[in-house]
Amino acid sequence: MSFKNVSKRYGETKVLSDVSLSLPRGIVGLVGPNGAGKSTFMKVILGFTAFEGDVRVLGLDPRTQAAELRARIGYMPERDGLPTGMSAVELCALGGELSGLPRGAALERAHATLGFVGLGDKRYALTDGYSTGMRQRVRLALALVHGPSLLLLDEPTNGLDPAGRDEMLALVAEIPRRAETSVLLSSHLLPDIESVCDQALVLEAGQVRYAGTLAQLRGDDHGPRRYEVRCKQDQDRLADALALLGWSVTKGASSFVCGAPDAKASTRPIFDSARALGVQVRQLEPARRGLEAALLETLSKAAS
Amino acid sequence: MNEAVIRERGYQAYTGPTQPSVRRVLAFHTARTLLARKGVRRSITLACVPALIVGVIAFVAQKAGAGDDAGRVANLLTRPWGTFFPALIIALIAAGGTLAEDRRAGALSFYFARPVVATDYVLGRLTGTAVVVALASVGPPLAVALLHIVQADAQSVMRALVSFATIAVLGTALSVLLAAYALLGGALAGSRGGAQGFLALAVLVPWVAAGVMANLVDGPWISLLSLPHIIESIAHALIVKQAGLGSIFASLSEQSEPTLPPAWMAAIALVVLAAATGAALYQRIDKLAHAGGDA
């Protein structure tokens, strides 16, 4: 998927502004605050809306080859809308047929896909009576039934309880392994992105703030090393000693996080200081910055 | 001895053939969904009753040597006692059950996220709805017209054939327009009641107004908006006033009945109504399709 100088306006408002990027295969998380342009970004990919610039998705132009493109894309919209009066298997078979599958193949895949999303035993029931979690699963099955090369998921865990959310995310993570399908997952829930995505695309005010791996976004791969240290006693004394050596220290209730003064520093000063102070270190491990903190930092950098 | 295999039955990539047939699939789905409704099946049964009565009368009249009244068969299509009411009931059910229901349920994205463009959606839905409406509006009159052909002697066979063809063509036009009105109601209103109200307003009001006003205003002009009157005028010219397309031009300045417009004018009105309804429907659906069904 590649975007080159893509812009989109709604009247005077610029929703996407000169977006240029290239997304690799895999599971990409699309994140950004409300009004960042995430939904418009997906609409551009699907060819729903006119835009300026050049877009290629799966080698096709959404402007002129929207129908061919949609036959190869599975889309799970944010809005919970399903045709009424049909069972899940009828609905999935119809979706498959509308995407170009022969009747027999569509029916066969409807059964397989509903089994995959965990609705095998409920597939003959009318979807009108389904719970929110079941409807989300049907909508995922509808996006998958024709075997798309690219899956667009817009807030797939909306309205799900924690267990349902975990199950939905486990399914999403499983898809590329089974069918070599790339996934673009839009969500405002950063833990969702963090648990299944290996790439992230950060949009804000219609502009790309970051496109790359999650590890890079969190700063896991470069920059000063940070460690979380837990001690048996006198934890604050060790923290203060490290601060005097130029380490950045953030104290917590049961542990503290310390950042090395330079990228080449090792853990040796921590152990040396602990030995000198007679403090017993019980736990020491690399401290990962949360995605939320990384995202806020990325957005604030862009703003400044 | 066969080797045992363990086959993965879960979700896999699809590698089989594809065959784009969106319109056929949508038309079939629409027709099947409508036929699953009790009201639709009862309306089709109800439409058979007047056709059966007219058929028996025609059969007996023919046996008694009293000749047949081809106009009565044409009237089956458009008169209140004929198949028009059952067909209208089916159109009303379709108005509330197809596009309006998709919009109410927010289900349009189900279609437009797939390789379905506005033209596919309009033609698929329209064909499916029109076929089911036609089962009530055209099916029974055609059966009676077929009886006429079977019973006709050498002299009257041509007239019976023209009568059959006229009923087939005009009945199909009536069914397609009723279906188009039903979908347009859903496209404009977006709720079941609104769509059904639109259809009732577009069909029933001009129909009643044409019947009442034609005598009051001393002219048939109001009936140019009434679908049944338009169809009846053309059918009357082609069947009752002897067969032949030339009869439309022959009746240029004639009126069949005080409440009916001249056939040529009715033919133009039919074309204009069909074009206007089709254009409005396409424009609205195209807008919905470009919004991804979210509008």
Image (cartoon, coloured by chain):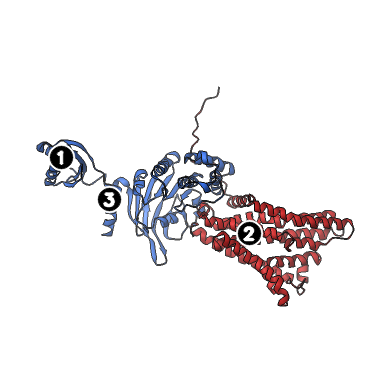
Chain colours: A blue, B red
Q: Quadrant of the C terminus of chain A?
A: bottom left
Describe the element under mark 3 as helix, strand or loop: helix
The picture places residue B201, in percent across and down from the top left corner, at 62, 66
Tell me the kind of residue under disc 3: Ala
Q: Image height check: is B229 above or below B95?
A: below
Q: In the image shown, does A245 or A67 lie closer to the viewer?
A: A245
Describe the element under mark 2 as helix, strand or loop: helix
Distance from disc 1 to disc 2, alpha carbons, whole Å, reads 80 Å
Residue at which label 3 appears: A293
**Which residue is found at the position 10% from the left and 38% from the top?**
A277
The picture places residue B186, in percent across and down from the top left corner, at 57, 60
* Label disc, if present, on residue B136 of the rendered structure: none
Residue at which label 1 appears: A270
* Label disc, if present, on residue B92 of the rendered structure: 2
Q: Image height check: is A293 above or below B217?
A: above
Tell me the kind of residue under disc 2: Leu
Mark 1 or 2, closer to the camera: 2
Distance from disc 2 to disc 3, alpha carbons, whole Å, reads 57 Å
Describe the element under mark 1 as helix, strand or loop: helix
Tell me the kind of residue under disc 1: Ile
Mark 2 or 3, closer to the camera: 2
Q: Chain of mark 1?
A: A
Q: Chain of mark 2?
A: B
Q: Image height check: is B9 above or below A49?
A: above
Counting other residues with Cα less than 10 Å from the Cα at mark 2, is it few (<14), some (14-19), or many (20 or more)?
many
Residue B139 appears anywhere in the view: no
Number of numbered discs overlaid on the protein picture: 3
